[in-house]
């Protein structure tokens, strides 16, 4: 999707070298997310330039995102083929976990429902001290279905995830940091710089080793120790062979 079309759905997309920045850009509507925005996000994932290693997801204005645009609800209740449609919506969120990239959510103000889940889709969350996470779906008679339940449980544990989702309460910055939802809390006017600093740190390590390590880390929870050791060996052998090929070329 070209720049003009992205603007029409309330998105900006900029690539600067190895860093891509996606900005939810409908601040007057608190960056509420439409179906068209999800389709555009999935499109960005499909066409992400190969050189990109860090993807920053941020929101313009006072809130990261107030969640699904409430006007979308009417369109969903009467829709047919819901299984396929929800699967399509999930594509907007899934690609942010790819091993070849590290995604960072820069979160200020409200991150409600789909906004919370978008932040959860990213590998890292750096938040402003005014952040307000809220999984509001159960309060609306719905479940969180935009890929957020798995990372939430993995980050904070089942009991805390049950507490957060089934009360639809707000989680502020101090708690978010304490329970592992946020890697770092900074003042609102320091958020952009903190994210840039993290991006620079992430870019300081070898690209292929970073992707291989992320693959290992992502797979760790689902494997036995024995299988994880085997996966470490396989990735390391690939790395060593690749380094040897590189040394050969340089000689
Ligand atoms: N959808 C559509 N418009 C929204 C919106 C949303 N989710 N959230 C805010 N807006 C609009 C408001 O209608 C208002 O528009 P107008 O100026 O045209 O009246 C504008 O954004 C500013 O909103 P507020 O004046 O309410 O701003 P605030 O800063 O005082 O409050 C807020 C911000 C706490 C986020 C509040 O707007 C709010 O509670 N919004 C609704 C949040 C919500 O329920 N989201 C759905 C969660 S469920 C989900 O996302 C996942 C799912 O699939 C079910």
Image: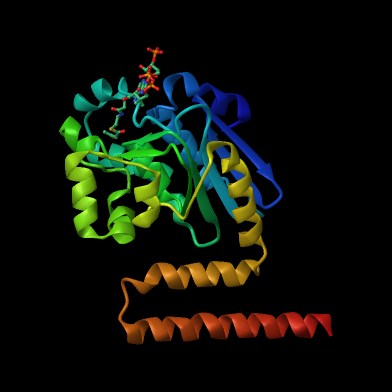
Q: Ligand 1 shows up in which quadrant of the image? A: top left
- At 43% from the left and 20% from the top, the residue drawn is 29
Q: Position of residue 21 (x, y in %)?
A: 59, 42
Q: Is residue 213 above or below residue 167?
A: below
Identified at 42% across, 42% down, the residue is 92
Q: Quadrant of the C terminus?
A: bottom right
In the rendered image, residue 22, in percent from the top left (x then y), is placed at 55, 39
Confirm whether residue 50 shows in the render: no
Q: Is residue 68 left or right of residue 165?
A: right
Locate residue 197, reporting x and y percent: 64, 53
- The N terminus lies in which quarter of the figure? top right
Determine whether 57 is above or below 6 in the image. Answer: below
28 or 242: nearer the eye? 28
- In percent of the image, x 41 and y 86: which residue is there? 230
Side (left or right) of 153 relative to 193? left
Residue that extends furthest to the right in the rendered view of this protein = 251
- Using the image as rendered, state which of residue 171 and residue 248 is in the foreground: 171
Let me know if residue 70 appears in the view. Answer: yes
Q: Quadrant of residue 34?
A: top left
Residue closest to the eye, 97 or 204: 204
Please tell me which residue is depicted at 35% across the width and 32% down the height of the picture: 67
Across and down, in percent, residue 142 comes to: 18, 36
Nearest to the observer: residue 102 or residue 233: 102
Q: How many marks?
A: 0
């Amino acid at each position: 999707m070209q720049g003009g079309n992205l603007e029409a759905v309330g998105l900006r997309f900029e690539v600067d070298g190895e860093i891509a920045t996606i900005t939810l850009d409908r601040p007057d509507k608190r960056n509420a997310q439409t179906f068209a925005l999800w389709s555009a996000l999935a499109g960005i994932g499909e066409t992400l330039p190969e050189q990109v290693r860090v993807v920053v997801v941020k929101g313009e204005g006072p809130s990261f995102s107030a969640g699904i645009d409430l006007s979308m609800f009417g369109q969903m209740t009467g829709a047919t083929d819901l299984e396929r449609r929800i699967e399509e919506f999930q594509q907007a969120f899934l690609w942010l976990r790819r091993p070849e990239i590290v995604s960072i959510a820069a979160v200020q103000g409200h991150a409600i429902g789909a906004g919370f889940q978008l932040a959860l889709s990213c590998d890292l969350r750096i938040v402003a001290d005014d952040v307000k996470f809220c999984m509001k779906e159960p309060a609306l008679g719905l479940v969180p279905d935009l890929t957020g339940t798995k990372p939430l449980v993995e980050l904070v544990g089942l009991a805390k995830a049950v507490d957060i989702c089934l009360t639809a309460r707000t989680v502020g910055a101090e708690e978010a940091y304490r329970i592992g939802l946020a890697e770092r809390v900074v003042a609102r006017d320091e958020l952009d710089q903190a994210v840039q600093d993290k991006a620079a740190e992430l870019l300081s390590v070898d690209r292929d080793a970073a992707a291989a390590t992320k693959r290992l880390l992502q797979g760790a929870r689902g494997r036995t120790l024995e299988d994880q050791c085997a996966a470490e060996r396989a990735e390391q052998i690939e790395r060593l062979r690749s380094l040897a090929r590189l040394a050969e070329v340089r000689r």
